[in-house]
Image: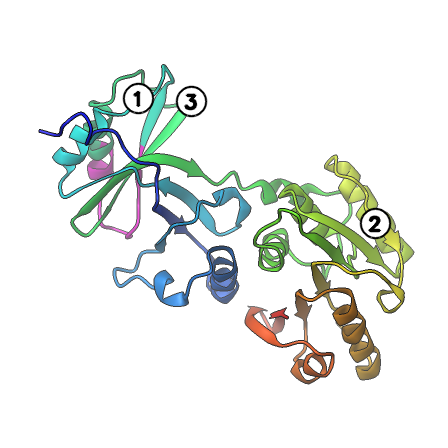
Amino acid sequence: MLSKKEEIPLPPSEFLYTYVCHEEEQALCAMELRALFTMPDAQLLQSDGGRYFSSEHAINPSRSPFLKLELAVEYTAESLEELAQHAAAIELGGSTFKVVYVETAPGAADYTDKRATERAVGARIRGQADMRAPEQLLGVARIGSRWMLGGCRESGAAWLTHNAKPRHYSTALSTRMARAVANIAVPEPAGVRVVDPCCGIGTVLVEALSMGIDIVGYDINPLAVRGARENLAHFGMPSNVAIADLRELSGHFDAAVLDMPYNLCSVLPVEERNEMLRSLRRLADRAVIVTAEPMDGGIADAGFIIADRAEVRKGKFTRHILLCY
């Protein structure tokens, strides 16, 4: 029998995350998670086929387009019965609750097993269960013989609502990619000033601002700036966008996102592209560059070092995402 002292959990020092991504987004997903959690890929590769990892860092899963859920591990046990005993010590302060089974390995538990697990733990918790709108969400997970229980946060998938913006452009980044790019550029938003010097219709700006990132945008195309302002206003965000040529911008920022201009019919002249890269280097020490063509040489000549990279393919079209310092 656990003593009273043992039943009082310490603040969580371990957080379990589950994630999901399409096949063509696997490299981008891994790159974003490396940036957010500063961890090697090995921690993302699970031998049982699941997509989960543990970290000592607590990050709201709604930040990432790939994270599904965060479980703050407060109790661990070697059996479900032992875990249910821990559940009896949980203090909810009068809040309603719901227990959810956190799936880490596909097929490890069927529907009946999952619901039985939720009931076994929920029956020991002192409080009122609410299956529709609980005030507190608790998660149960099992990895091998280790059972875990704690507070749970699910992703709100805010970027999905940003698909309904009034202005669109055929070659603009998807909201999912834009959000991942913003996270790679700015893993820790506090005190960081960011610039998007070729912002187009503001897809990256919308995602960054929705996550509390201090970002401003510029574009040489007045129509793009007008579209960006309209999109930002649609979501109640400040229209921090102005008409400007990247090569003429001044000042210095902590980070930058540059989606290199391109279209499906022509390629940016090499010298103009390289001039833009040199200007970007002058503006920021850290940058995420998105390009439709390889340009490692120009990036190196501009004074950047490529620290990480990913490719996202869609049909015959490939985007290169490069984290540079």
Q: Residue at the spot x=86%, y=63% of the render?
A: 249
Q: Distance of mark 2 from mark 3, alpha carbons?
A: 39 Å
Disc 1, SS: loop
Which of the two labelled residues, at mark 1 and mark 3, occupies the earlier sequence position?
1
Residue at x 75%, y 71% (from the top left corner): 281
* Residue mark closest to the camera, 1 vs 2: 1
- Left or right: 289 as drawn, with respect to 30: right
Depicted 124 relative to depicted 164: above or below = above
Q: For the residue marked with disc 1, what is the amino acid? A: Glu
Residue 140 visible in image: yes
Residue of label 2: 241
Query: In the displayed image of the protein, which residue is found farthest to the left?
Result: 1
Q: Position of residue 159 (x, y in %)?
A: 60, 45
Question: Which one is earlier in the sequence, the residue at label 2 or at label 3?
Answer: 3
Does the stretch in magenta take in 108? Answer: yes
Quadrant of the drawing holding the N terminus = top left
Instruction: From the top left corner, tell me how far across and down residue 40 is, in percent.
Output: 41, 66
Amino acid under disc 3: Glu
Residue 91 shows which numbered tag? Answer: 1
